[in-house]
Amino acid sequence: MIEKLNFSMQTVFRLNYIEKECFGKEAWTVNNLIAEYQNDFSHLFGDVEDGEVVGYVCVRIMYEEAQICNIAVLPQYRRRGIATSLLQTVADFAKAQGCDRCELEVNTANTPTVKLYEKCGYQIVGTRPNFYRRTRRYPTRDAYTMVKNLES
């Protein structure tokens, strides 16, 4: 079940665990997560199963735009529609906040995630060269900028 995640250190530690499982050395730290909770523009939503968060998304609402900062689902819970539900929750929330569009960046070599975003209505609108730090996960540092227009 998708719900808005309120701040608690227990939730922060759980999200940090998800981050480490999904992103390894590139994971957000506990301090990064606390900073998102302290940011008035940021909102976090999670999929909770059996009392535990198994996937989450962080979105910043800035005027007419919702910027998806991060989305992660534990590997053993993937391919169950959780990421799709999280993205739909963000779109619904953003629209209710008066946003015209949702935007995100994704590594150009992350083909499965690009396909997920396209399935959810996002379109590639540009490329940002050298957007990411060099990692072993992907052969490129470039990011696609993807946008989903929210219908009125």
Image (cartoon, helix red, strand yellow):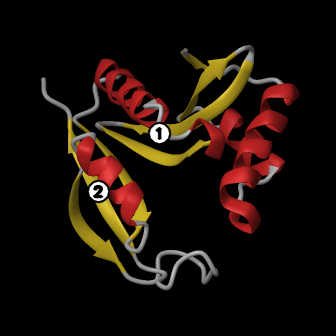
At 77% from the left edge and 40% from the top edge, which residue is drawn?
Answer: 34
| Disc 1 residue type (three-letter) | Arg
Q: Is residue 20 left or right of residue 87?
A: right
Residue count near mark 2 (Cα–Cα under 10 Å), binned few <14, some 14–19, many ≥20: many
Res. 4 image quadrant: top right
Residue 66 sits above or below residue 140 on the image: above
At 29% from the left edge and 56% from the top edge, which residue is drawn?
Answer: 146
Residue receiving disc 1 = 79
Q: Is residue 1 left or right of residue 37?
A: left
State which mark lies toward you, 2 or 1: 1
> Of callouts 2 and 1, which one flags the residue occurring earlier in the amino acid sequence?
1
Residue 52 in percent (x, y) is at 74, 22
Residue 75 in percent (x, y) is at 63, 46
At 66% from the left edge and 53% from the top edge, which residue is drawn?
Answer: 22
Quadrant for the N terminus in the image: top right
Local SS, label 1: loop
Residue 67 in percent (x, y) is at 41, 45
In-front residue for pair 41/1: 1
Local SS, label 2: strand
Residue count near mark 1 (Cα–Cα under 10 Å), binned few <14, some 14–19, many ≥20: few
At 33% from the left edge and 29% from the top edge, which residue is drawn?
Answer: 91
| Disc 2 residue type (three-letter) | Met
Residue 53 sits above or below residue 77 on the image: above
Res. 107 image quadrant: bottom left
Q: How many numbered dots are placed on residues in this image?
A: 2
Q: In this view, does 37 lie to the left or right of 44?
A: right
Residue receiving disc 2 = 146
